[in-house]
Amino acid sequence: MTDFSLIETLRWQPDEGFIRLRLHLARLSRSARRLGFPQPIDATAKLDEAVAEATGPLRVRLTFDPQGRITVTSAPFVPLAPETVWTIRIAETRLQSPDRLLRFKTTRRAVYEAARAEYAQTEADEVILLNERDQVCEGTITSVFLDDGSGMLRTPPISCGLLAGVLRTELICQRKARVGRLTLADLEAGRLYVGNSLRGLIRANLIRS
């Protein structure tokens, strides 16, 4: 399994630097170790170099290949308005929970691209995928969170077949979220959110068609 690279997508703010940098670097290092890649010892230096002359918020993408090569690209980033609500749809495309690569953020994106392509951009801001057991997994670019009234957000376990998102990890560590399996019925009964480290937590409206 060496025909892909690892990815980390970070937000950089002029007054804060890289958001959740420690968690991003920890995930990158952990993924490299588990997949037999070299350790990304130059990652911090490459990231700092990419933003050395930046003056505004950036979306920064780091890729790390099996040979240990790091590539960093950046683009201007515009945050979502606080009151933003995304329209969410459910994909017919399924994830397979035994697929261990789903636990890692990589350039193998075919299944997510297929799910996203099921709906036009005007029909959905994000598309959620289920696994072979009809359990909720994740969005094409986000983790899934449900406010079920318990006082903590609920997010699916990695064993369902999904990425350990950086925002997801932070919320679990802060005891703002807990792991628990989710069904479509759960999503329809509670208040849905999706999110990632780049954009944060986003209120979501699920539409079943």
Image (spheres, grey):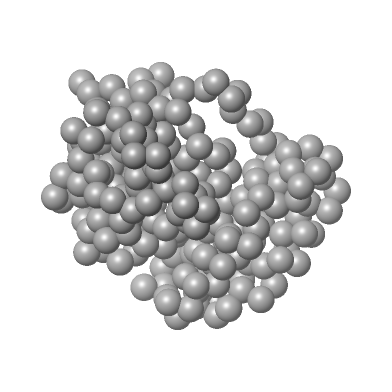
Q: How many marks?
A: 0
Residue at (47%, 40%) from the top-left corner?
Answer: 195
* Rendered location of residue 22, percent (x, y): 63, 62
Quadrant of res 148: top left
Would you say 39 lies left or right of 164 here? right
Would you say 114 lies left or right of 36 here? left
Q: Nearer the viewer, residue 119 or 205?
A: 205
Residue at (66%, 31%) from the top-left corner?
Answer: 78
Q: Nearer the viewer, residue 192 or 124?
A: 192
Q: Nearer the viewer, residue 183 or 32?
A: 183
Q: Nearer the viewer, residue 134 or 175?
A: 175
Res 162 visible: yes
Quadrant of the drawing holding the C terminus: top left
* Rendered location of residue 42, percent (x, y): 69, 72
Extreme residue toward the left, this view:
133
Please say if 29 is above or below 162: below
Residue at (66%, 50%) from the top-left corner?
Answer: 19
Would you say 162 lies left or right of 84 here? left
Please say if 47 is above or below 140: below
* Rendered location of residue 138, percent (x, y): 34, 45
* Rendered location of residue 65, percent (x, y): 53, 69
Please say if 57 is above or below 173: above
Res 110 visible: no
Quadrant of res 1: bottom left
Would you say 90 lies left or right of 65 here? left
Residue at (47%, 70%) from the top-left corner?
Answer: 31
